[in-house]
Amino acid sequence: MITLNELTKKFGALEALKNISLEIKKGTITYLVGPNASGKTTLIKSILGLVKPTTGFITIDNERLNGNHSYRSKIGYMPQIASFPENLTVVEILKMMKNLREDLTSYDEELIGHFKLEKEYNKRLKNLSGGTKQKVNAVIAFLFNPEILILDEPTAGLDPVSSSILKDKILKENNNGKTMVFTSHILSELEELAQDVIFLLEGETRFRGTITDLIRSTGQQNLERAIASIMKGS
Amino acid sequence: MKILLKIIRYQIHDMSRSMWLIIYTLFFLVVGYGLTNFSSDAPKVLVSIMNITLIIIPLVSIIFGTIYHYNNKDYIILMLSQPIKRKTLFFGIYLGLIIPLISSFLIGTLIPIIFSRIVLGDYFDVLFYLFGSGIFQTAVFVAIAFMIASYNENRMLGLGLSIFVWLCFAVLYDGMLLIIIQYFNDYPLEKILIGFSIFNPIDLARILIILKLDVAALMGYTGAVFQKFFNTDLGIIVSVISLIIWTGIPLVIGNKKFSKKDF
């Protein structure tokens, strides 16, 4: 379980997160939705310890984050932009990640097969396409069987086939009891996967609940219109 | 510690395939080969190699270090989302960068010198200082680069600052010293100059090497005072300590910022 307690983050004069308190329950798929610059990525990065909150704090499984690093072994992260040392090959980067996590001996490499990444194994990362890099990124996020998965626009750079492979994987891992936190702009994906929606607008939570709640509370007929009406209603 | 070594290992692996590193090595090879063929006068060759390395190493180190930091920001973020301490990553990247750069310099300079007619045994101490200074220049200027990159999110500003810092140490500082010497002609400045040279890692290295060669006689009375100071154990200890401080301070400041900043 991830808990945010009155979390505020300021970048100079800009308030990226304004006093956010929320709970993300174990085993749910939670979607962070909101327009650009609404604070989604800042929120995700705070959970990962990449961004240090100005005030407030975060706890994961009742352990308060205070600059320690060990809690991140529970988290798999797939950033929006993938980047690796450019002269390493795919197989080397996977080996490196495994090497850095000596505490583990079993890996979840299912996605490598599904994405057919083996044929790219000996290519250097600088020669890979954006989509292929994103696939490597996804493989790394799932590699260590983490309890919590944080995916920042995971399907953005992927073709429909790969994107549905990833979605299947997400559902499968969720059935295994994993907690997932996503951001996405693709509404069809939201309708397909989201169990819980957090709507962020200008650093504040505007809505929290299921998709049906969201549609009902705005009085609109579908998700797209419901979201549009929240954005406008600000 | 184990994780640090692993980060360094993969980084060296990555760097060793970098085209820029190969060009850097080739540069030293070509310059060294050219200079050793031009003249058979060993001190002249060594002074020329020293002059080139003292310009090129700081420049390449500071620019390469800054660009490397900016180009690998997303990689740094990915690594920091793993259970790795920020400090470990910072020093891992630092060491993983300077080790290949230093090896490049050592290979590139040593090979032409070995194949030339310079009798290595006669100039052992000069070579020792030459290589030592090359190693320290790399360590100092990559450290400064990392400090600058940690503080500045804007890569253009960061790169500009790096070039400016290099310019200060390589050119402006000497110019300033000359003006001071000119103005205070009538005063005995030798001891003060020793103090000033310690504040510039490039000058310090240059003085150390020149004093090992006969050309030091050309430096006149100042040279004699320098010789008296830098040729003693105390002088050498002071120089080495000040070079270590020159590496340590930017690293400590850079690491502090790196550990606190938002990515």
Image: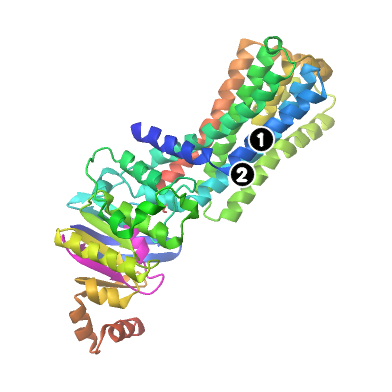
Asked if the stretch drawn in magenta spans residue A50, the answer is no
**Residue type, label 1:** Leu
Say left or right for B212 vs A86: right
First in residue order: circle 1 vs circle 2: 1
Query: What span is in magenta?
Result: A23-46
Q: Distance between the residues labelled 1 and 2?
A: 18 Å
- Chain identifier of the residue bearing label 2 in the image: B
Q: Are marks 1 and 2 in contact (CB under 8 Å)?
A: no
Nearer to me, B145 or A81: A81
Nearer to me, B137 or A143: A143
Q: What element carries label 1?
A: helix
Q: What element carries label 2?
A: helix
Nearer to me, A102 or B56: A102
Q: Is residue A211 above or below residue A132?
A: below
Name the spot of residue B14 as percent of width and height, x first: 48, 41
Residue bearing mark 2: B63
Q: Residues at marks 1 and 2, common chain? A: yes
Q: Residues within 10 Å of mark 1 (few under 14, many from 20)?
A: some
Question: Could one spot residue A212 in this view of the protein?
Answer: yes
Q: What is the quadrant of residue A195 in the picture?
A: bottom left
**The C terminus of chain A, quarter of image:** bottom left
Question: Could one spot residue B200 in this view of the protein?
Answer: no
**Residue type, label 2:** Ile
**The N terminus of chain A, quarter of image:** bottom left
Q: Residues within 10 Å of mark 2 (few under 14, many from 20)?
A: many
Residue in the image at 30% along x and 83% along y: A224
Residue bearing mark 1: B26
Nearer to me, A83 or A17: A83
Say left or right for B97 vs A183: right
Say left or right for A26 vs A203: left
